[in-house]
Amino acid sequence: MSSEITILQDEHGLLELAESFDTQLTEGMSAYQITHFVLSDLEFPTPDSKYYQCLREMRTRYESIVSLEQEYLDLQDEIALLGLEIEEQEPISMNGPNSIEAKRADIRMQQAQRKQDHKRNELHTMEKRASEVLRELQVFYDLYTKLKGQRKYDSHEAAEAETWRARFQQRLQMGQFDQLPPIPEARELVEDFQRQRIAAQQQNGNIIPARAAVPQGNSGQHPLQ
């Protein structure tokens, strides 16, 4: 970040603080966020579901790195072109310092130099972003490697039924009755859940809670009807 910024007047040491942003802040997600939020047990309750989500996340970040590389190379070319523009203006600016053409050349050189500085800052920001994406990619890769040995199924399709059943049961246990996915065995799982709750309530002598609603199927008809 350029120290030539004068708007702030730097009365409170803001420029010095700004210089430390890169070292104090993490732009991407932490390993904790990735493990517990992106790959949460609620959304991805089985090793297979976490494994395939790791693949999706790694693909997204790989595509981001490829795109960033292209942007980075384009930005380097723009900086080089601005350097040529400065070189073109230098002899004009020295040819009669008080002439209109020399003054115009000086202004053009200053503009080109400011643009170069701005684009170099953009390069730095892009390098930081790429570093964060690669760090996240490594976290996902480490989890992917660990989960690879825990899989039960050979394909995503084969793992889907157990994943959705586990999601259903997780939300049922948490009381998220309005978020139950309409899986084929919804009726069976809800009725089993209700029997267990009733038995537990009767054993403890508490009031039995209201029934959980079974999610509707594709036909729009309630499965318990």
Image: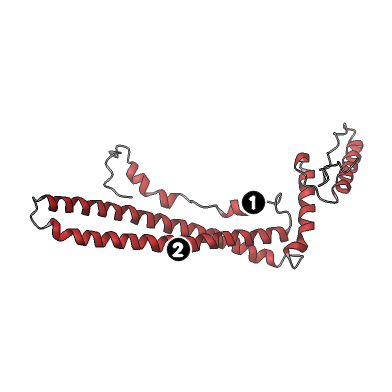
**Marked residue nearer the N-terminal end (1 or 2):** 1
Q: Mark 2 is on which residue type? A: Glu
Q: Mark 1 is on which residue type? A: His
Question: How far across and down, in percent of the image, does residue 19 sit?
Answer: 36, 49
Query: Residue, x 73% and y 54% (percent of image)?
Result: 45
Q: Which mark is residue 72?
A: none
Query: Does 95 sit left or right of 16 as displayed?
Result: left
Residue neighbourhood size for the residue with mark 1, other residues' Cα within 10 Å, grouped as few (<14), some (14–19), many (≥20): few
Above or below: residue 206 compared with residue 154: above
Question: How far across and down, in percent of the image, does residue 48 sit?
Answer: 72, 61
Q: Which residue is mark 2?
A: 69
Q: Which residue is mark 1?
A: 36
Between 197 and 85, the one nearer to me in the picture: 85
Above or below: residue 93 compared with residue 181: below
Helix, strand or loop under label 2: helix
Between 142 and 78, the one nearer to me in the picture: 78
Q: Quadrant of the C terminus?
A: top right
